[in-house]
Image: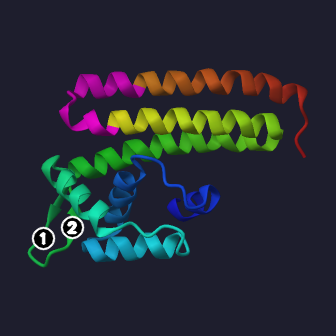
Amino acid sequence: MCASWIQRVGSTIPRGFSRYFILDLLKKKPLSGKEIIDSATKQSDGKWKPSPGLIYPLLGRLLDEGLIEESKDGKYQITRKGKSTADDLETVTNIVKNQLDVLFRIGNVGRFAAIDILERISTMAAMLSSNVSNMTKEETEKYKKFLQSELRKIDEPEKKKGKDIKIE
């Protein structure tokens, strides 16, 4: 998931991406800070090499929020709360990816709309990620329903247009 996304956007990494990149990596196995940096560099074919000044403070925030924990051997592993957060993000990502695939197939207008949507989602995700640890379960559900509602609004006009446009 992450490697193909990085290749599409080049070396520009949106705000908030690093947080979810780390959670996604740690879902697979515990890693040290250096291994996280090395994984980012490898997956992006060297286009993105996060600095220790980015990764270690971010790991500290994720520890404070209870999304990860540090083991005795100095590796970081994801907690249940962190896995739940990462799974929620993956669900939203899959919904958005499916909608963006349709937009990209439509042509230049679709690409313009897709880029606009990505910018909005990136901004919203950054704001949400900075507040998620302070939210109640009810507030989290409210945000989830809101995001799903907004994605349906985007999807409905495209489905109607899709009836008029044959994509080969």
Which numbered disc flags the more N-terminal residue, 2 or 1? 1
Question: Compared to 157, does 82 lie above or below?
Answer: below
Q: Quadrant of residue 167?
A: top right
Q: Quadrant of residue 40?
A: bottom left
**In front here: 131 or 93?**
131
Which amino acid does the dot numbered 2 rest on?
A: Tyr
User: Distance of mark 2 from mark 1, alpha carbons?
Assistant: 6 Å
Question: Compared to 83, does 117 lie above or below?
Answer: above
| Whole-percent x, y for residue 82 in the image | 26, 50
Question: Residue at the location (49% across, 54% down)?
Answer: 13
The residue range painted magenta reads: 129-144
Question: Compared to 67, does 128 lie above or below?
Answer: above
User: Which structural element holds mark 1?
Assistant: loop
Q: Is residue 31 visible?
A: no
Q: Is residue 138 visible?
A: yes
| Whole-percent x, y for residue 150 in the image | 53, 23
Which amino acid does the dot numbered 1 rest on?
A: Ser
- Chief SS of the magenta region: helix
106 left or right, relative to 47: right
Q: Are marks 2 and 1 in contact (CB under 8 Å)?
A: yes
Q: What residue would you read off at disc 1?
A: 71
Question: Residue at the location (12% across, 70% down)?
Answer: 71
Q: How is the image coloured?
A: rainbow
Q: What residue would you read off at disc 2?
A: 76
